[in-house]
Image (cartoon, rainbow, N blue to C red):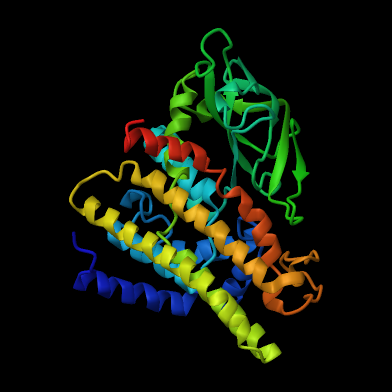
Amino acid sequence: MNLNFSEEEILFQNEVQAFLEKELTEDIVSAAKSTSAVFTEKDIAMKWQSKLAKKGWLVPSWPEEYGGTNWTHTQKYIFSSECAKAGAPNLIPMGLAMIGPLLLGKGTQEQKDYYIPRIVSGEDYWCQGYSEPGAGSDLASLQCKAVREGDKYIINGTKIWTTHAHLANKIFCLVRTDNSGKKQEGITFLMLDMNQPGIKVEPILTMAQDHDFNQVVFTDAVAYVKDRIGKENEGWSVAKYLLEFERSGGVGGSKSLSDIQFIKKLMNKISATHNDTSFIDVYSTKVTELEIKAQSIQYTALRILSSLKGGDSPGPESSMMKTLVTDLEQEISEVTLEIIGYYGIPFQDTSLGSNEPAIGDEFFRSIAGKYQNLRATTIYGGSNEIQRNIMAKAVLGL
């Protein structure tokens, strides 16, 4: 097992760092840091997406004919790690990391030719219609109904926790097209326009007062047969294929190490303000423990990459990485909130363009909101309880 980068990989790392130094401007980094939401503000994310697309680095895992890079697993890791360390905003995943790869793997050539360029350019902004009231973890219980009429499907029902539905012009949905068999049967995967009379979007605010989520109500909404992925009533297998892209383990601890550096800056700033070094003594052990965890995750990611170079499959390690990374994200947010003390109590507006002055230091503005919103990281993308069950079966044989 070799955990060291080759000379070629080091040269690539230098190229990525040079690109980030030039193109990752302070306004983008500042906006990414200041948001408390799970996803970066759309305007900032799309600005960064445009820069990456122009460079040809937006979708490195895709086939080259659709904008991919033909990078190795290690190069992809280096790129993701350097972006995390530099403070680059997260890209919005619904198009680039979910429906895009699904279209490339399961879509028709006509669907690829039409939708893929629009995803890369940002012309189409997607949201995901999976969960429903009463059908979240038990997704096969969904009841949003689609009835075929000629070359169309007429859709009636509700989707919930639909991220960025208020911003999206497209949605991909799981709908019920047959009730006669097992609940996993009779489900169909459809793509449709959000901008039509039969769709109503109702906001759901988080505890931090961020508007990421929505309830989407369909009343005789229209989807076209040509925009179905896979066969009618076989959408369950399509959905499982898509979830493989959603349930990734992040960038192997690099983002966590960046967050820990923020904690250290925060501690030094508070200590200097109050002229009291005992503050650092109190929290240095906790921060060191977090840093050790982040570094161990990073080395685990490198070990997995080493096995991939040899042609192995990551196997249950993907579940392990998802669990470790999201658990650590929550721990880091807890320690950060604890450090700022009572400054974490008041609500602070972190929306882009807000002119409300920060309560306390500007560093404090987004900390409480991030803590609240990060409670969801161990749920979405496959709950950590489910991931532990996968590991128990695959590794321990339980």
- Furthest residue to the bottom? 275
Residue lying furthest top: 180
Residue 146 drawn at (x, y percent): 63, 20
Q: Could one spot residue 164 in this view of the protein? A: yes
Q: Nearer the viewer, residue 165 or 327?
A: 327
Count of labels shown? 0
Across and down, in percent, residue 302 comes to 30, 60
Query: Would you identify the image quadrant in which residue 388 lies?
Result: top left
Which residue shows up at 18% across the image and 51% down it?
A: 310
Of the 4 image quadrants, the one containing the C terminus is: top left
Most foreground residue, 91 or 240: 240
Q: Position of residue 104 (x, y in %)?
A: 39, 40
Judge by depth and name the residue closer to the eye, 199 or 187: 187
Residue visible at 45% across and 79% down in the picture: 21
- Asked if residue 307 lies left or right of residue 222, the reply is left
The x and y percentages for residue 243 are 46, 38
Q: Is residue 229 above or below residue 62?
A: above
Where 380 falls versus 346 (above or below)? above
The residue at the point 34 percent across, 46 percent down is 317
* Quadrant location of the N terminus in the rendered image: bottom left
**Does residue 249 appear to the left or right of 77 in the view shown?**
right
Query: In the rendered image of this protein, does residue 240 appear above or below residue 125?
Result: above
The residue at the point 77 percent across, 69 percent down is 354
In the figure, is residue 281 to the left or right of 4? right
From where the camera sits, is residue 265 visible?
no
Rendered image quadrant of residue 83: bottom left
